[in-house]
Image (spheres, helix red, strand yellow):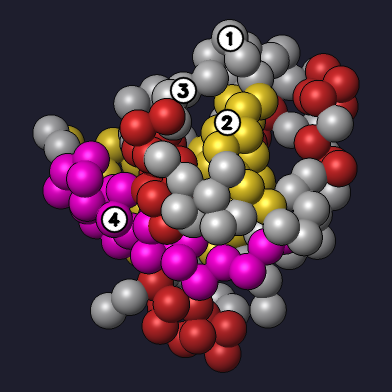
Amino acid sequence: MSWRSFRRRSARRRATVPERVTRSEAETEAVAAELAGGFRGGEVVLLTGELGSGKTAFVRGLARGLGADPEEVASPTFVLLTAYPGRLTLHHADLYRLRGDGDDRELGLEELPGPSGVLAIEWAERLSQVPWPRSFHVTLEHVEGDLRRLALSGGAS
């Protein structure tokens, strides 16, 4: 079952949170590419999960689904915000190095993604506020070995 059909089902039953288990980094990327394939611009993806849970792999998949070069995507540990051109511009923020005391406001993320972009934020739990009324929340959890559990909630109506 695709995430698109999960989204349609969860729109009818908001209490349902779609989950997927992936068995490899490539599979995590494929799930994200499928999700991004339906994006039209203006989407925000908030990613949470421990180190090594697959957040950057998920963003690489978003890039592929948006027509950007997934090989260009890396965890922007020292560059907090990067943009990748494609069918829609992917804005990629990594808040790992932020203190979480409001220092994210200096990045101007609330101005993004714009109508022809998508914003993906790793370590979204460090945001001082979430100014986007409709956003996708993706939680990634390392299960064991290469297994990752992905839970999706929210999204544009």
Q: Is residue 146 above or below residue 64?
A: above
**Mark 2 highlights which residue?**
123
Picture quadrant of residue 83: top right
> Which numbered disc flags the more N-terminal residue, 3 or 2?
3
> Which numbered disc flags the more N-terminal residue, 2 or 1?
1
Task: Mark 3: give few (<14), some (14-19) or many (20+) Cα within 10 Å.
Answer: many
Disc 1 + disc 3, Cβ < 8 Å: no
Disc 3 + disc 2, Cβ < 8 Å: no
Task: Mark 1: give few (<14), some (14-19) or many (20+) Cα within 10 Å.
Answer: few
**Mark 1 highlights which residue?**
78
Drawn side of residue 66 relative to residue 45, left or right: left
- Type of amino acid under label 2: Trp
Q: Secondary structure at mark 2?
A: loop
Magenta region: 20-42
**Mark 3 highlights which residue?**
75
Disc 4 + disc 1, Cβ < 8 Å: no
> Which numbered disc flags the more N-terminal residue, 4 or 1?
4
Q: Residue at x 84, y 42 (%)?
A: 110
Q: Where does residue 8 sit, x and y in percent of width and height?
A: 50, 85
Label 1 vs label 3: CA separation?
9 Å
Identify the image quadrant of the N terminus. Answer: bottom left
Q: Where does residue 128 sit, x and y in percent of width and height?
A: 81, 32
Q: Secondary structure at mark 4?
A: helix
Q: Residue at x 85, y 31 (%)?
A: 108
Label 3 vs label 2: CA separation?
11 Å
Q: Residue at x 71, y 57 (%)?
A: 116
Does residue 39 appear in the picture of this structure?
yes
Which one is in front, 40 or 18?
40
**Mark 4 highlights which residue?**
30
Picture quadrant of residue 43: bottom right
Drawn side of residue 38 relative to residue 32, left or right: right
